[in-house]
Image: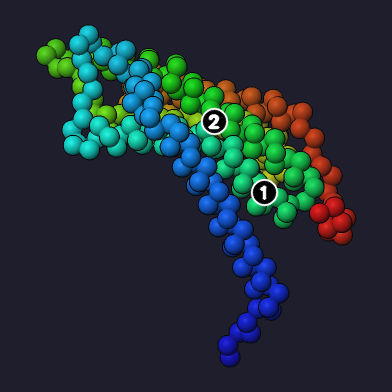
Amino acid sequence: MDAAPPPEGEQETFLSHLIELRSRLMKSIIAVAIMLVVLFPFAKDIYALLARPLLHALPHGATMIATDVTGTFLVPLKVTLMAAFLIALPFVLWQAWAFVAPGLYQHEKRLAAPVIVSSVVFFMIGMAFAYFFVFPVMFGFFAGYAPAGVQMMTDIDKYFSFVLGMFLAFGLTFEVPVIVIVLVRMRVVSLEKLRSIRSYVIVGAFVVGAIFTPPDVLSQLMLAVPLWLLYELGLVLARFVSVPAPVADGEEAAVK
């Protein structure tokens, strides 16, 4: 026997949620598109800023190359799109927050706003750490290690892909304190349990460093050591996080 169709009220609620989701997605896309239009005249300058760490490490007279006919246009466009998304990210996250907030309880709403803000801040700090500290050391090492008679000339598209991957790796690494605090705050895992697995986290940090960075030891250490230290920072900060007392279903529904 066929299952009975959902009540008409539930269908209308589901459709209203889909319409709202589409609306907020469109607003987010429009915000990114507007920033892209604003930044596009400066696309070459933005790419030059991104390429500066490598260009400073290359020998005198060496340049980057474009092996694809459209690379000189598409790569600066991709970099500008990345910059536009980062600038519009607070608005995008606010749209996501406005969509999910009506379904959250009061104590969850109080936690969500600080988590969103701190996540963006820590992700930006991770990208800045990679750009200002990791890239100069890494590119200097690779440029100085080139064999005699070999000149390092990197393709701009491959450089962008490499830099984007490193930004994601270090940005997510710097989210560790936020993740630790949320896990403790939401009672997913206790602080004592997180302390007890410290040795496994240290080993895992070096495994992550070996996977997501180039094969040189220095680059791996520059990801693994901050990952470990940020985990320790999360443990310290989680001590000051107050855990809410359990709330009965009836009480929780009353505060929604």
Colour theme: rainbow
- Residue ID at (65%, 29%): 234
With 246 as the anchor, is 50 left or right in this view? left
Please say if 131 is above or below 84: above
Give percent across and percent down for residue 49: 38, 21
Please say if 29 is above or below 60: below
With 2 as the anchor, is 205 left or right in this view? left
Quadrant in the picture for residue 143: top left
Quadrant in the picture for residue 7: bottom right
- Residue ID at (32%, 18%): 54
- Residue ID at (39%, 33%): 40
Q: Residues within 10 Å of mark 2 (few under 14, many from 20)?
A: many
Q: Is there any visible trace of residue 173 in the rendered image? A: no
The residue indicated by pointer 2 is 123
Q: Is there any visible trace of residue 27 in the rendered image? A: yes
Marks 2/1: CA–CA distance:
21 Å
Amino acid type at circle 2 is Phe
Give percent across and percent down for residue 129: 49, 21
If the image is split into quadrants, where does the N terminus sit? bottom right
- Residue ID at (67%, 48%): 98
Q: Earlier in the sequence, mark 2 or mark 1?
A: 1
Amino acid type at circle 1 is Ala
With 107 as the anchor, is 31 left or right in this view? left
SS for dot 2: helix
The residue indicated by pointer 1 is 98
With 73 as the anchor, is 30 left or right in this view? right
